[in-house]
Amino acid sequence: MTFEETYLNDNILDALYDMHFEEMTPIQEKCIPEILDERDLIGIAQTGTGKTAAYLLPILSMLDDGGYPKDAVNCIVMAPTRELAQQIDQAMQGFGYYLDGISSVAVYGGNDGSRFDVETRGLKMGADVVIATPGRLLSHIRMGHLDLSRLSFFVLDEADRMLDMGFSDDILSIAKQLPKEHQTIMFSATMPGKIQQLARTLLTDPVEVKIAVSKPAEKIQQSAYVCYEPQKLGIIRSLFKAGELERVIIFSGKKDKVKDITRELKHMNINCAAMHSDLSQAERDDVMYRFKAGQVSVLVATDIVARGIDIDDILMVINYDVPHDAEDYVHRIGRTARAQRDGIAITLVSEQDMRYFADIERFLERDILKNPLPDGLGDGPEYKPSAPRPHHKSSRGRGGRSRSGKGRNGGKGRNGGKGRNGGKGHTSS
């Protein structure tokens, strides 16, 4: 389906043609019409599926069509990290190229005082679209820098990651500032119970759109060690003694374990650095810069870097613990075997994590190779996958209001003189 077949307005379509975007991705095809019909929506989709365009394009189109206050914040887009907020802001600049009357401001932490002043001025002037991390936005709200009482669109991007990072209370505090009548759009890569609860709290009769998670690349060599928890550091030591490993990410779900692993690797004189929520934004930026530049060989991280960070030369991913969601496992190991390269993914499976690892194997529809434990560590537990846990599917809501008079005829001619080359492409912002 092409963007031309939707009723996105002419200015949005002009920008898309200039950017050589014509064919929609599946998440865009399913979400854009529903959002244009003013439905609350929850979209379940991975990073890289085009979800940013799936919500930005219809919102910008509606704002450009008019009928919204010029002296108010009309849309809030919330993202868990500064990096994602910056990516959304860049997409906003491209999609909004021909929208002369639509203003935006990006609001996120980790900046100096001058940046905060720029944000404050933009908010007080009534930016149409505010792209923000939860903590920074709440700071501005508490200082009286913006009024959300006339907001029309409230977007939560990577909502599951925001909850994992402890932003639940901030999100609810911000939501209390919103008017009763507004449209809420939520995107998440996974749908655990806490996301379902948040959706029930914030959304009204939402449409649910789910795009199946892609299986890991075939080039990833996946294996596991079934072990007791105290044996894990011994396995890590053995892996790094076996050879000079570089371009490695070690994931753990807990920041305390990240610190323990980093401390152990440093005792082995491994060039490593930690990435977790106790670090300031400036410290996280520095760690990520040094890792991308090759100044750090091994990155030990919580899931804060599992998504949305483009690093193409990762050779190995080690899961120090098993993600409790199969889709999180795919996100983690998806950091390797990119750009046509081979990759290795190793997972350390303790007794309490066997059930979750069995879920991953069922999701992948394959048994993952179980490696023998290194010499000197003794025997590990027997691998006993339990029965699958039930998965509850939410029914997809239907219906909704049409935007009378806003429809477009398929193939309608565009205004000339924009210098389009007619190329095809997908938006994957």
Image (cartoon, rainbow, N blue to C red):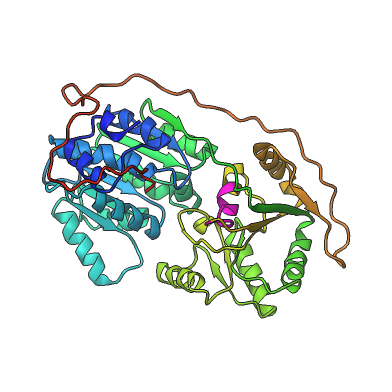
Residue at 52% in and 77% down: 295
User: Is residue 56 rendered magenta in the image?
Assistant: no
Name the spot of residue 366 as percent of width and height, x first.
Answer: 72, 40
Name the spot of residue 86 as percent of width and height, x first.
Answer: 33, 58
Residues drawn in magenta: 330-339
Name the spot of residue 405 as percent of width and height, x first.
Answer: 16, 23
Name the residue nearer the viewer: 273 or 228.
Answer: 273
Tell me the chief SS of the magenta region.
loop
- In the displayed structure, 25 sits above or below 339; it is above
- In the displayed structure, 202 sits above or below 120; it is above
- In the displayed structure, 114 sits above or below 129; it is below
Residue at 61% in and 68% down: 259
Residue at 18% in and 48% down: 419
Examine the rendering and report whether any part of residue 157 can be seen.
yes
User: Is residue 337 rendered magenta in the image?
Assistant: yes
Name the residue nearer the viewer: 289 or 185.
Answer: 289
Q: Is residue 386 left or right of residue 329?
A: right
